[in-house]
Amino acid sequence: MAIKVKIPRGKNTAGGGRRDPVLRAALIGFVVLAASFVVVFSYFYVKYDRIITHRFSGPVFANAAKIYATPPTVSVGEKTELKAIAAELRHAGYSDKSGESKMGSYHLTGNAIEVQPGPGSYHNPEPAVIRVSNGKVESISGNGSQLEAYELEPEMITSLFEGDQRSKRQVVHYNEIPKVMVDAVLAIEDRRFFEHSGVNFVRMFGAVAGDVSRRLGLSHQRYEEGGSTVTMQLSRGFFLTPEKTVKRKLTEMLISEELEQKFTKQQIFEFYANWVPLGQRGSFAISGFAEASRTYFNKDLKDITLSEAALLAGIIQGPSYLSPYRHPERATERRNVVLDSMVETHAITREQADKAKATPLKLAPPNVEANDAPYFVDLVRDTVIGKLPEREMNDQAYRIYTTLDPDLQRAAAQAVENGIKLVDDQVNKRRTKRVKVGKGKYETHMEPGPDAQVALIVLDPHTGEVLALVGGRNYGFSQLNHAVARRPTGSIFKPFVYAAAMNTALDGSSPVLTPASIVPDQPSTFAYGDQIYEPRNYKEEYHGDVTARYALAMSLNNATVKLAEEVGYDKVADLARSAGITSVKATPAMALGAYDATPLDMAAAYTVFSNNGVRVSPTMVKSVRTADGDPVMNFTPETHQVLDPRVAYVMTDMMEGVINNGLGFSAVRVRGFQQPAAGKTGSSHDGWFAGYTSNLLCIVWVGFDDYSDLHLSGAQTAAPIWTEFMKKAAALPRYSDMKSFSQPSGVVDVQLDKVTNLLATPSCPQTYTSAFIVGTEPTSTCDQSIGVKGVLSRIFGLGNQQAEPPQNGRTVEQKKKGLFGKFAGIFKDDKPSNNVPKPPNASGNSH
C-alpha cells in the first residue's frame, strides 16, 4: 500500500522562505554554468574537429622525393666477399626472405648469392647468381647467360627536403614498424595506450601527485612515465604550442579524445612514429623512428635490434639532453631504464634485458658528410628543381638516381675530417706568439682568426660523374658549399700554360716547345698594355735556364710566365676557357692562376688531361623516375675535345714528375701513396692540390672564407688530404686497380741523360724518362759532347757545348758557383728538397 507524505509549503513552515531563493539561485547558477560549459565545449569541439579534419584530409606527412646513390657494380674477377654483397643489398632494402620487401630479396647458397630484384627495384626484374671463390667473383649468370658485370640495387642516401623546412623523415606504415619498437615506446611512454581513450587520468593524477610529493620533500621516488599519453603528445605536436598552461592542457586533452574517436589505435601510433622528434643531424631535424634508425644506426627500421629500439624510445624524453653522440652515458642509462620497463610490461624477459644492457652503443659514424653527403644533396636539389617543379617531385615521391658512391663519400669525409685537423694544428702554430709582458716575463698568446675551410671533389675522369663531394668542414655550422665557391686557382692553373706550349708541336707554331725546351727562370718584368707585372719566385730563389718539365715540377713562377709569353697569352687563355675556366684574361698574371674558378670547375678542367684531351662536364644526377620506376628525365654529360690525346698524355707524364720528383713528392709519395698518379700543387692565398689516377680525379681546396692568407702551401694543406683520400680509395675493391696511364699512338718515351738532357747512352748512367710527341724528341746523344772541350766547358763555364740543355738542373745561376760547386752540380740528381717550401707572400708568387 502506497504512503503519500505531503510537505507543507505555507509561509509558516520553518526556514522555507529563506531556503527557496537560495536553492533557486543555486539551481539557476548550475544550469547557466552547465549550459555555458556545453556551449564552450561544443564550440571548441567543433573548432578542433574542423582543424583535425582539415589536417588529416590529405596525406598526414608530405611525400618527399628520394635520392639514391649510384648502383654498385660487381664484376667478374673483382675482389669481394659474399657477405659484402649481402650487406650492400640489405642497405638497399632487400630482404633475405622472398616477398618481404618490394625492393627484392637475396639468398645465400654455399659459394653463391642469388639476387632477385622486386617490383620496387631500380632494375628490370632480372635475377642473377653471383659466385665467389677465394675472395674473387668467379662468375655471374643471369637469364641463362654469363655476364661480365651486374649492377646491384642503389642505396638510398636521403629524402629531398622541401623549401626551408629542414626536417627529414621516412614515412612508414604501422605494419612496417617492428614489434620491438612498439613495445619499447609503449613501455616507457604510454603503457595503457591500447586501453585508454586518449587521456590516462590515473597516470596523470599519479604523475601530479608524485611531482607534488617530490617538491614537498615527501618522496624521492622516480616516475619514469609523465602525464602525457602518446595521443596527447601527438596532439601537442600537431596542433599546439609548447607553452605550459591550464588552457593548453585542457585543449590537448580535448584534441586527444577527438583523435581517438576518429582513428584507430594503430593509425594514431603510426602518426606518432612518423612525427616524433628524435634529434638533429647537421642542420636537419630528425623526425620519426625510420629516419632516426638511419641516422643513428645506418640501417632500416625493420632491421633494428632490441637494444637499438630501447635507445630510440629512451631519447624521446629529451633528444638533445640524451643524444648518444654527445652524451653516451646518459643515453645508455636511459636505454637501460626502457629495458627495465619492458620487463615490467612483460614485453621481454629479464634475461633479454640483461643481454641488451650489456650491448655497447653501436652508432653510425657521427660525420654527417660520410652518410648524408649534404653538400652533394644540395647540389642535386639545385640541379633537379631547375628542370622539374619541386612540389611535383615531392608530391609524386619521385626517385632521383645520382652518381654518388657511398664508399668513396665515406672515404672523402674521413680524409677531410682527419686532414683539416692537421691544417688547424699548422694554423694555430703560426698564430701562436710569445709576447713579452715584463722584464724577463713572457706569455704565449694565440692570435684570433677564422677556421680554415675545405672542399674535396672526386670525379670519374672518363665519365664526369661526381663520385664524392665535401663542401666544407661542418655542414651543421655552415651550409656554404665551398665546392662551388670561386677562388683564385693558384698554381694548379699552370698545367694549362704548359699544355698550350706542348700544343705548338701540332698547331704549326714556331718554335716548337717540348718538355725539354729551355725556359729562363730569373727576375723579370713583363709588360702587358700599360701594365707592368713583376712575379717573384718563392724565397726569391731563381734557377736560371731550366727545362719546361723541371719548371712545372718545381712550380717556378718566372719560368712559367716567360713560357706563357712565348706561347702567347691569348693561346693560353683560349685553351683555359675551352677547358671551362671562363674567368681568365690573357694577361701575364693569368699564368700563375690569378683568376677565379670553383673547385668543381677545376675538376672538370682537369678531365682534359685525364681523359685523352676530352673535357667532360661534371654530372651528379643520372635520372629521375616515378615511384613506380618509370623514367621522367635522364641526364647526360656534355663532352668536347680540347686537346689532342698526345698533348694530354705528355702533360700527364709531366705531372707525374710533379709527384715523383717535384713539389708533390713529400705530400704524396712520402705519405705512402705509391700508385701511378699525376698532379699539381697550388698555393696563392689558398692551398690546392689537383691530381688523378687512371680511374679517379680528385681536387682539394683549403682556405679561409674571408680571403685572408693561409701562409701555408698546397703541399702542406691540400695535398695530404688528397693523399689520405686516395689511399682509402685504393683500398676499395672496385678502385684498387689503379693502372699506369695509357699511352696513345704518336707518343714516344725517351730515356735522357740527367746532365745533358740528350739521349742517354751507357756512358751517361744518370737517366730519366720523358714522353714526347713523335718527331719532337731529342736526337743527339749525351756522349757526343763528352770531350776535352765539353768537359772543360761544363766545369769552367767556357761555353755551352750541349745540343740540348739539361732537364733537371740549373745551367745558369743567379749567383756564380765556384769550381767545386760547378763540378758537383754536374752530378746533382733530380730529387725534391725535404724542406717543403712555404707559400708566397706577394702578388704573383705562387707554387
Image (spheres, rainbow, N blue to C red):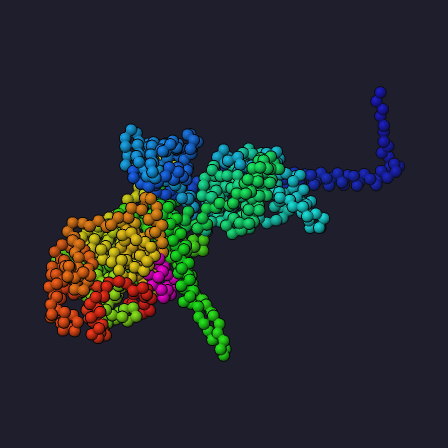
Report if residue 241 is visible in the image: no
Magenta extent: 701-720
Return the residue nearer the eye: 393 or 649.
649
Nearer the observer, 73 or 123: 73
Can residue 339 be spotted in the picture? yes
Image-based side of 292 in relation to 697, left or right: right
Seen at 48% across and 35% down, the residue is 176
The single residue placed furthest to the top in the displayed view is: 1
What residue is shown at x 42% (from left), y 67% (from top)?
431
Q: Quadrant of residue 402?
A: top left
Is 59 a magenta residue? no
Residue 704 in the magenta stretch? The answer is yes
**Quadrant of res 808:** bottom left
Q: Is residue 409 left or right of residue 610?
A: right
Is residue 706 or residue 56 the one in the foreground?
A: 706
**Horizontal and vertical percent position of residue 663:** 29, 62
The percent position of residue 110, horizontal first and vertical second, equals 38, 32
Q: Quadrant of residue 701?
A: bottom left
The answer to whether residue 48 is above or below residue 560 is above
Q: Residue at horizontal 21%, vertical 61%? A: 549
Spot occupied by residue 742 in the image (x, y as percentages of width and height)? 22, 49
Identify the residue at the far bottom of this view: 439
